[in-house]
Image: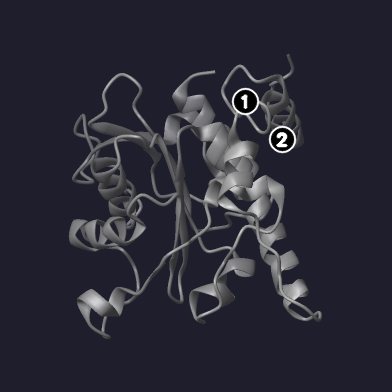
């Protein structure tokens, strides 16, 4: 599969699992040009096809004189790729299960194995801190994007107050794999908070072990990783059988 076909598949998978709906988007850095990335034109995730993919620079400007309507919040992707050379996939979503953690002081923590990539801390970004209380909460300029990227820092996920979240990773497969399980982690965490006793989150050492070769290696050649990916492709009617 190519980067473009991976992005199409990612959109369909994330829509199928309720991470994306009419809004939200996922991108991938161009493997042949670190100063560019692929992202669909402004379209709902379940409708994205290969012909809808556009190419952008790290200012969020469309390349090759592509005049199709882009996502307003493409600056999220541009700013993170510019700030993080290690990142090759960026996802922005408004998943309902995550929203309570964006408007409270309750930390969003990894309590199930399949979201170990979010790390021990998920920072929270509030657009009004840097841009006042009269914005529409959208990341609609590159300055907004850079401010968000600064809060993300070296983390792999950032909450966005009253809006949603942005996550990133070293590959499309790995970013999607984590994202598919984020709503489940949120539901488990919220349910656990209703029970007696402290909630036990994953430790940094456990996360490192899970993400390693012996635990949850999600490299492109990992049979375990491809097994999940191929199932998700089949669920959305795409060919991925190996």
The one of 151 and 141 positioned closer to us in this rendering: 151
Residue that appears at 76% across and 31% down: 231
Mark 1 highlights which residue?
213
- 234 up-or-down from 41: above or below: above
Task: Specify the farthest residue to the right.
Answer: 195
Q: Quadrant of the N terminus?
A: top right
Q: Nearer the viewer, mark 1 or mark 2?
A: 1
Mark 2 highlights which residue?
232
Q: Residues within 10 Å of mark 2 (few under 14, many from 20)?
A: many
- 92 up-or-down from 190: above or below: above
Residue 55 can be seen, yes or no? yes
Q: Is residue 82 left or right of residue 230?
A: left
Q: How is the image coloured?
A: one colour
Task: Specify the farthest residue to the front.
Answer: 205
The spot of residue 203 in percent (x, y) is 61, 54
The one of 209 and 21 positioned closer to us in this rendering: 209
Marks 1 and 2, how far apart in space? 22 Å
Circle 1 SS class: loop
Among the two numbered marks 1 and 2 on one chain, the one whose residue lies closer to the N terminus: 1
The one of 6 and 70 positioned closer to us in this rendering: 6
The one of 125 and 60 positioned closer to us in this rendering: 125
């Amino acid at each position: 599969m190519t980067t473009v076909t991976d992005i199409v598949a990612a959109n369909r998978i994330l829509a199928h699992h309720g991470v994306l709906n009419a809004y939200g988007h996922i991108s991938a850095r161009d493997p042949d040009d670190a100063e560019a990335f692929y992202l669909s034109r402004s379209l709902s995730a379940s409708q994205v096809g290969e012909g809808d993919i556009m190419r952008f620079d790290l200012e969020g400007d469309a390349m090759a004189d592509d005049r199709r309507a882009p996502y307003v919040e493409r600056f999220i992707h541009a700013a993170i790729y510019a700030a993080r050379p290690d990142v090759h996939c960026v996802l922005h979503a408004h998943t309902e299960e995550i929203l309570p953690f964006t408007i409270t002081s309750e930390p969003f923590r990894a309590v199930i194995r399949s979201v170990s990539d979010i790390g021990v801390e998920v920072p929270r970004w509030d657009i009004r801190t840097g841009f006042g209380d009269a914005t529409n909460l959208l990341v609609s300029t590159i300055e907004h994007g850079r401010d968000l990227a600064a809060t993300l820092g070296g983390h792999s996920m950032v909450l966005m107050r009253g809006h949603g979240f942005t996550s990133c990773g070293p590959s499309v497969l790995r970013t999607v794999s984590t994202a598919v399980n984020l709503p489940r982690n949120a539901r488990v965490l919220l349910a656990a908070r209703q029970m007696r006793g402290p909630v036990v989150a994953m430790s940094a050492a456990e996360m490192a072990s899970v993400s390693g070769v012996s635990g949850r290696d999600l490299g492109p050649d990992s049979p375990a990783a491809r097994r999940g990916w191929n199932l998700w492709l089949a669920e959305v009617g795409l060919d991925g059988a190996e």
